[in-house]
Amino acid sequence: MRILRDFNIPDFKFPKLKMKNVENIDEVKVDYEALKKAQNKEKGKNKNYEQTNYKTIKEIFIRSREKFADDTFILEKFNPKDSFTKISYKQFTDDVIALGTALTNKYNLKDERVVIIGENTYNWYVSYMAMLCGAGIAVPVDKELPANEIQNVIERSKATAVIYSGKKKDIIKKIEDSLPIVKYFIQMNSDNKLEGRTVGFNTVVSEGKELVKAGDDSYMKIEIDPEEFKVLIFTSGTTSNAKGVMLCNRNLAANVNAVSPYVKLDENDRLFSVLPLHHTYESTIGFLLPFANGCSIAVCQGLKYIVPNLKETKPTAMLAVPLLIENLYKKINATIQKSGKAGLVTSMIHITNALKSVGVDIKKKVFAEIYENLGGNLRIIVSAAAPIDSKIGKWVQDIGINFLQGYGLTETAPIAALTPEFEPKIGSAGKAVVCAELKIDNPNENGEGEVLIKSETLMLGYYEDKEATDEVIKVDEEGNRWFHSGDVGYLDEDGFLFITGRSKNVIVTQNGKNIYPEEIELMLGNIPEIKECMVYGKEVEGEKELVISARVIPNYEEIEEKHGKDLSEKQIHDIIWEKIKEVNHQLTSYKAIKNLEIKKDEFVKTTTMKIKRYEEIKKDN
C-alpha cells in the first residue's frame, strides 16, 4: 500500500524467551474431538462475511454512538508513568459533537479547511471525526515535515484553522505570522482561553459542550453529502509539484464496507495504533473501521515502547509496515536462538502445521511465550505500504497469527485489495475488495502489466490539478473510472494480486516512505550545470534499501563557461555532485540523493518528450 511517507523504526527490546512450552509439548492438553468438530463447522467457510453498506461516516458515527456508548473506544497513556486511560464511545462522541458545534457555531469554521498536525493522540481522533461529520474539510499533515513545508501545506490548502499538538507549538509560533489566512491556531491538550488567534483545544470543546447543554443541536443536524469533498491529503512533500488527494465521505465509508466481507471485527477486538494517523492506512483502517465495529484502539506511546505497550493493552490486531514486522521477526528469532531451542521451534512449526491441516490447532499453546510477549491476544497482523519477504509472512502464519496483506494508495483511500482472513495467500497483496475491480493493462507473456483499479474508494481527483487527475484516471466507454496505479503486477487464477514491479514514479522504501522523483527533479532542474535528469531508486546488490540516484545529462556549455574548458569526466562529476549536495540540504534526509550517474546518451522518451523511467531503469538490469 503506497501510502506511508515517513516511518523510522528505533531499536526496541524483546524479552528473553525460554520456549518452555515447545519443550514440554506432551504437557499441552488438547481436546481433539472438540477441535475436530469446530474444524468441521469451518469447512466451506471460504466465503465472504456479511457486508456493511454505509454511505457516510456520520451514519457510522450515529450508529456507534448509540450501540457502543458504554464500551471502551480509546486507550491512551497521557502520562508515561501512569496506566492507560480508557475513554468510552460516549465520551469520545460527546467530545466530537462539542468540538464540531463550537467550530461551526462559535468560530464560524463550517465548511472551512482545517489542518490537523500532531502525534497519534486522543485529540487527533476527535478533530478528524469532527471534520468528517460536518465541521469542515480535514487536512491531515505529517508531523515530521519541516516548518517551511508545514507552512506550504497550510497555504496551498487555504486552511483557515490549524489544530496542532503541543510538540508542534514552536514550529507553529515560527510560521504563524506568515499565515494571515489562518483565523485560529488551536493547541491540543491546552486550556488556554482565546488570545489573538490562539486558543486551547480543551477550551473549544468546553465551549461546545455549553452550547449543546443549552440546546444547540445544529451540528448533529448537518446532513452529509456522500460525494462532498471532506479530506485533503498531500501525497508527499509539499512543493508546488506535490499532489493533493481529494476524498469524500463515500470513499471512506466504502473502505469500511470493503473490509467487512474479508475481516470480521467486533466489540471484543482491540487494534494497536502504531502507524501515523495522517496516513489513510491508519486513519481509515486503523480508526474508522474499528470505530464502526465497536472495537477499542490502544495508542502506542512510541515505537520504542511497542513490546511493553502490547503486553499492557493486549490487542487482537495490528496494522504495520514491513520494516516493523521484520524487526519483530528478527528480535523474536534472535532470542529463540539464544535459548538454544531454534531447531526444536522449527520442528514444532512443522508439527503444528501438520496438526492444523487435519483440524487440530495447538499453535497458541505451543508458542504461548511468544504470544504473551505480544500481549497474548494478537490474532491478526496486516502488512502494507511496501513489499515484505514472504518467509516472514509465512513465519507469522506458522506461529498461529493471521498474516494479511493490503494494497492500495492514498488515491484509493486506501484499500483496493486485501487478503481475506479465511483465505490466506502469503506473498500476494490480496484480492480486490468487494467494491473494487482490478485489471492488468497490456499484460506481457507472464501476465504482468500496469495495475488498474476501479473502486468506490477512488478519490474525487487531485486538488486544483485537473491535468494530473486526467493523466491517472481514464474513463472507459461504459463510464467507469479506472485509476492507473503505475504499479506492475499480475492476477493469479483466484484473483489474488501479486506486485512484481515498483511504481513507475514513486520510490517506496523498505519502511514505507514514499519519495516522488518529480519533486526532487524539479529542484535539480534549477541547477544550471544540469541539462536533464531522472531520479530513481537504484537496486544495488547487497543493499536491502534502494539507493536514491540521479541520472544526469550535464549542460556542458554552462559548465565550460563557469568552470573552464577541457575538464575530465571526474571533474564534471564532482562539480555536479557539489551542486546536488546543496539540494540535499533542502531535502528531508530519506529523500537525499546518494548516488550520481553521468549519462552520455539521450534519455528514452515518449512522443510527448517525457522520460520513460521504466525503460531507463531496465537498462541497468
Image (cartoon, rainbow, N blue to C red):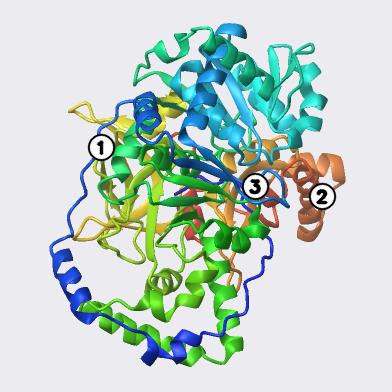
In three-dimensional space, the C-alpha distance between marks 1 and 3, rounded to whole angstroms, equals 32 Å
Lateral position of residue 114 relative to residue 444, left or right: right
- For disc 3, the marked residue is 77
Q: Which residue is mark 2?
A: 578
Q: Which residue is mark 1?
A: 52
Q: Do callouts 1 and 3 mark residues in contact (Cβ within 8 Å)?
A: no
| Residues at marks 3 and 2 touching, judged by CB atoms closer than 8 Å | no
Whichever of callouts 1 and 3 sits on the residue coming sooner in the sequence is 1
Query: Who's the residue at 46% across and 69% down the image?
Result: 389
Horizontal placement of 262 versus 194: left or right? left
Q: The residue under label 1 is which amino acid type?
A: Thr
Q: Residue at x 49, y 49 (%)?
A: 613
- Density class for disc 2 (Cα within 10 Å; few <14, some 14-19, many ≥20) is few
State which mark lies toward you, 3 or 2.
Answer: 3
Does 330 sit above or below residue 547? below
Q: Quadrant of residue 509?
A: bottom right
Q: Is residue 420 above or below residue 102?
A: below
Marks 1/2: CA distance?
57 Å
| Of marks 1 and 3, the one in the foreground | 3
